[in-house]
Image (cartoon, grey):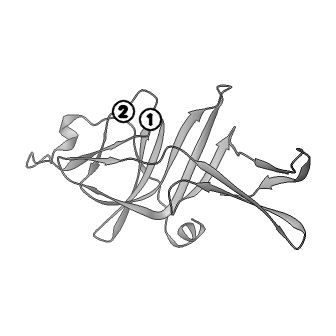
C-alpha cells in the first residue's frame, strides 16, 4: 500500500451511499443503460474502487449503512478493487473497523444494465506458531483472510493492539508481547 500511495495520485473518491434513481441508470441522450449495479455481502462498510478510462483514473467509494443491502450504481467499465472496510460492534457495543488495502487485488467488471456481486470474506483467522531458535522462544502470528490484502483492525480511532502469550504445559508465561501488523 505504501508503494501505491507513493506512486499513484490519490484523488478524493466519488462517494455513492444510496441506491440510484432509475434515471441515473440511463444515458440522458439515448435512454440506454449507462450504469450497472454493484451488490455486496458487506452490511455496514465501504468498498474502494478505481476505474481508468481513456487514461484518466476515477476513484469511487461505495458505502452501506446497517439495514441497507441495495445495490450501488457505477458507470459501466472495469474497476480495480483497492480495499474495503467492515464496521462491526464488539460484545460491549463499541464499534470496530476491519480495514483492508491493496494496490489492486481484484478486478470488477460492471456491465451497463446488469448487476454484479462483489462478495468479500467477512471473517479473519489468526494463526499462531511457536518454536525455539537457539534456545529462545519465537512466535509467529498471522491474519489470514483474502490473499493480497493488508489488514488492520481499528477501535476508537486507533489500531487494535494484538497481544499474545506463549505458555508452558503448566500455564506459566514463557514469552508475551504485542504483534506488529498492518
Name the residue rendered at 18%, 38% in the picture: 23
In this rendering, would 180 be left or right of 119?
A: right
Name the residue rendered at 63%, 37% in the picture: 96
Q: Nearer the viewer, residue 110 or 92?
A: 92
Whether label 1 touches label 2, CB < 8 Å:
yes
* Residue occupied by mark 1: 43
* Residue occupied by mark 2: 69
Tell which circle, 1 or 2, labels the residue nearer the N-terminal end: 1
In this rendering, would 10 be left or right of 25?
A: right
Give the percent coordinates (x, y) of residue 74: 29, 49
Q: Nearer the viewer, residue 152 or 34?
A: 152
Residue 52's place in the image compared with 36, above or below, is below
Q: Nearer the viewer, residue 78 or 31?
A: 78
Name the residue rendered at 46%, 44% in the picture: 46
- How many badges with numbers are in the image? 2
Q: Secondary structure at mark 1?
A: loop
Structural crowding at the residue carrying mark 1, measured as other residues with C-alpha within 10 Å and reported as few (<14), some (14–19) or many (≥20):
some
Name the residue rendered at 19%, 35% in the picture: 22
Res 174 → quadrant? bottom right
Give the percent coordinates (x, y) of residue 75: 26, 52
In this rendering, would 80 be left or right of 125?
A: left
Q: Secondary structure at mark 2?
A: loop
Which quadrant, please, contains the C terminus? bottom right
Which quadrant, please, contains the N terminus? bottom right
Amino acid at each position: 500500500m505504501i508503494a501505491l500511495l507513493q506512486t499513484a495520485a490519490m484523488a478524493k473518491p466519488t462517494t455513492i451511499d444510496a441506491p440510484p434513481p432509475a434515471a441515473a441508470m440511463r444515458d440522458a441522450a439515448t435512454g440506454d443503460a449507462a450504469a450497472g449495479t454493484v451488490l455486496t455481502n458487506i452490511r455496514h462498510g465501504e468498498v474502494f474502487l478505481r476505474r481508468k478510462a481513456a487514461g484518466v483514473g476515477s476513484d469511487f467509494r461505495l458505502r452501506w449503512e446497517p439495514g441497507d443491502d441495495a445495490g450501488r450504481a457505477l458507470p459501466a467499465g472495469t474497476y480495480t478493487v483497492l480495499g474495503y472496510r467492515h464496521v462491526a460492534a464488539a460484545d460491549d457495543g463499541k464499534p470496530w473497523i476491519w480495514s483492508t488495502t491493496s494496490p489492486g487485488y481484484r478486478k470488477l467488471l460492471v456491465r451497463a444494465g446488469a448487476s454484479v456481486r462483489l462478495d468479500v470474506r467477512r471473517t479473519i483467522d489468526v494463526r499462531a506458531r511457536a518454536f525455539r531458535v537457539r534456545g529462545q522462544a519465537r512466535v509467529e502470528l498471522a491474519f489470514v483472510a483474502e490473499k493480497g490484502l493488508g489488514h488492520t483492525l481499528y477501535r476508537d480511532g486507533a489500531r487494535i493492539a494484538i497481544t499474545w502469550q506463549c505458555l508452558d504445559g503448566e500455564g506459566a508465561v514463557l514469552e508475551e508481547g504485542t504483534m506488529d501488523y498492518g
